[in-house]
């Protein structure tokens, strides 16, 4: 049972510490929209989304008014479109355009699910969809794409890794006139969760109900303010402060999710308690780490501090709700986090340190601008490194890189809004990994995959 007193305690957090519901995401299965005729299939997709999600945005606004809780985004995730493309054939971009029409009709911020799951190999429709991603993202505004190329159970599909390096490069080039915005809507996963409400990686997994409501909560500023009240505490005390704060934040998400579920008449799925930062001053995961005693995020000790934060957030959230899921932890997107941006600009935060941090964060190398000259095989190698961390550690990892076409290390790339801005970070471009990537095949699953 929800205790409203727990929610009322968060009023100060909302008013002064940037606490918000980052997203209410409706997951919709499109499996029953498959058709041998792609045009009929697209019409079914549009009809089902608009029928089920027609009141999603208004419902979110009504809940905001009732409780005074900001709900920043209202979103939709759908079945990986490659599954529909397998049945229909034709150009998968038609599905992207149907999803865009549905986004326009419902008024949602994003629809995620222009996706393929190829961790163990390509099935019908997968390669066609992946090759269409640059065109799909360049011709739509509100569609997000993701590809899962590895898992602890299956290993890493290195043919898909090679292909995704090329796709990211092409996406950057085709949207270069818009600061390569297409790449900000494209993420490559290892161990992708089926119930993630956060973009750009959200899709509606095949194990999910026909329609479901997920909630993503965020409050880095709240955690930082709580730690400011414990300036001399040891790490055990810090962990307790974070757990208690995460508990309160999760209860708020549980309230919103339960209310949205009842109003829309669909099951409530999960609360994803992920500390997703913004460029707003104070709303930063990096500042939490610095509050623990680091002079600057990225210096020695950063990975340990992030590990403590991620673990405490998960423990606090699990105690607050039996429906915690998705990613739940701490995101470290560079361009979306004011503290990360500052650390990258000062040189304290390198991509090598970020890779180490991804071993203990919620996702991975997220929203990182790299030089425009970066070749596809280097992008693929970065994906392979990150997927290896996820595969071996049985955790979700992801890569969202933006090759800044026409720009070099040290220059800036700016998107505005939640996507923020940041410096173009240096890579090792003086040495080639092309021969490694060209080998292809599959990196076998690790021994820890044998759990049956």
Image (spheres, helix red, strand yellow):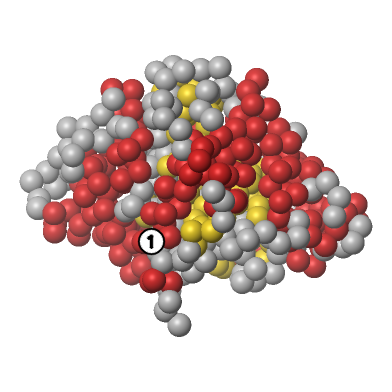
* In this view, 323 is above or below 163: below
Quadrant holding the C terminus: bottom left
Circle 1 SS class: helix
The image shows residue 142 at horizontal and vertical percentages of 67, 40
- Residue 103: x percent and y percent? 73, 45
Q: Residue at x 45, y 52 (%)?
A: 387
Q: Is residue 23 visible?
A: no
Residue drawn at x 18%, y 39% is 300
- Residue 141 on image: x %, y %: 69, 35
Vertical position of residue 69 compared to residue 446: above or below:
above
Instruction: Judge from the rendering whether residue 67 lies leftward or rightward of residue 82; answer left or right.
Output: left
Where residue 435 appears, as percent x and y from the top left, is: 50, 41
**Quadrant in the rendering for residue 209:** bottom right
Q: Would you identify the image quadrant in which residue 317 lies?
A: bottom left
* Left or right of 336 in this view: 175: right
**Residue under the image location 20 percent in, 57 percent down:** 239
Residue that protrudes farthest toward the bottom in the picture: 452
At x 74%, y 36%, the residue is: 135
Q: Nearer the viewer, residue 360 or 327?
A: 360
Could you say which is closer to the camera, residue 251 or residue 118? 118
Quarter of the picture holding the N terminus = bottom left
The residue tagged 1 is: 392
């Amino acid at each position: 049972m929800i205790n409203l007193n727990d929610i009322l305690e968060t009023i100060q957090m909302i008013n002064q510490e940037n606490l918000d519901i980052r997203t209410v995401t409706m997951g919709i299965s499109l499996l029953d929209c498959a058709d041998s005729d792609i045009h009929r299939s697209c019409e079914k997709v549009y009809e089902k989304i608009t029928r089920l999600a027609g009141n999603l945005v208004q419902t979110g606004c009504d809940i905001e008014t009732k409780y005074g809780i900001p709900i920043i985004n209202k979103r939709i995730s759908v079945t990986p479109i490659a599954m529909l493309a397998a049945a229909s054939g034709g150009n998968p971009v038609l599905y992207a355009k149907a999803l865009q029409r549905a986004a326009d009709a419902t008024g949602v911020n994003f629809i995620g699910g222009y996706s393929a799951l190829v961790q163990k190999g390509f099935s019908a429709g997968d390669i066609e969809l992946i090759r269409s991603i640059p065109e799909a993202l360049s011709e739509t505004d509100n569609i997000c794409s993701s590809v899962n190329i590895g898992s602890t159970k299956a290993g890493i599909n290195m043919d898909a890794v090679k292909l995704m390096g090329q796709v990211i490069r092409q996406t950057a080039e085709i949207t270069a006139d818009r600061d390569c915005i297409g790449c900000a809507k494209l993420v490559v996963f290892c161990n992708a969760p089926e119930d993630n409400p956060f973009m750009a990686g959200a899709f509606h997994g095949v194990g999910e109900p026909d329609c479901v409501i997920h909630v993503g909560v965020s409050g880095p500023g709240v955690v930082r303010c709580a730690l400011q009240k414990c300036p001399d505490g040891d790490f055990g005390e810090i962990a307790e402060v974070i757990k208690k704060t995460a508990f309160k934040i999760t209860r708020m998400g549980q309230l919103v999710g339960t209310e949205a579920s009842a109003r829309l008449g669909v099951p409530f799925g999960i609360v994803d308690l992920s500390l997703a930062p913004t460029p707003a001053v104070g709303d930063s995961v990096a500042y939490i780490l610095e509050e623990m005693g680091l002079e600057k995020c990225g210096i020695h000790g950063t990975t340990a501090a992030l590990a403590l934060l991620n673990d405490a957030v998960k423990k606090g959230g699990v105690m607050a709700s039996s429906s915690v899921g998705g990613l739940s932890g701490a995101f470290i997107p560079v361009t979306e986090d004011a503290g990360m941006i500052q650390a990258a600009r000062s040189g304290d935060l390198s991509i090598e340190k970020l890779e180490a941090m991804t071993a203990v964060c919620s996702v991975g190398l997220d929203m990182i601008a790299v030089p425009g000259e970066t070749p596809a095989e280097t992008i693929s190698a970065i994906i392979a490194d990150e997927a290896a961390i996820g595969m071996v550690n049985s955790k979700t990892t992801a890569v969202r890189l933006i090759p800044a076409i026409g720009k070099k290390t040290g220059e800036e790339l700016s998107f505005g809004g939640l996507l923020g801005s940041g410096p173009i970070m240096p890579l090792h471009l003086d040495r080639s990994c092309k021969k490694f990537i060209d080998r292809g095949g599959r990196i076998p699953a690790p021994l820890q995959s044998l759990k049956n």
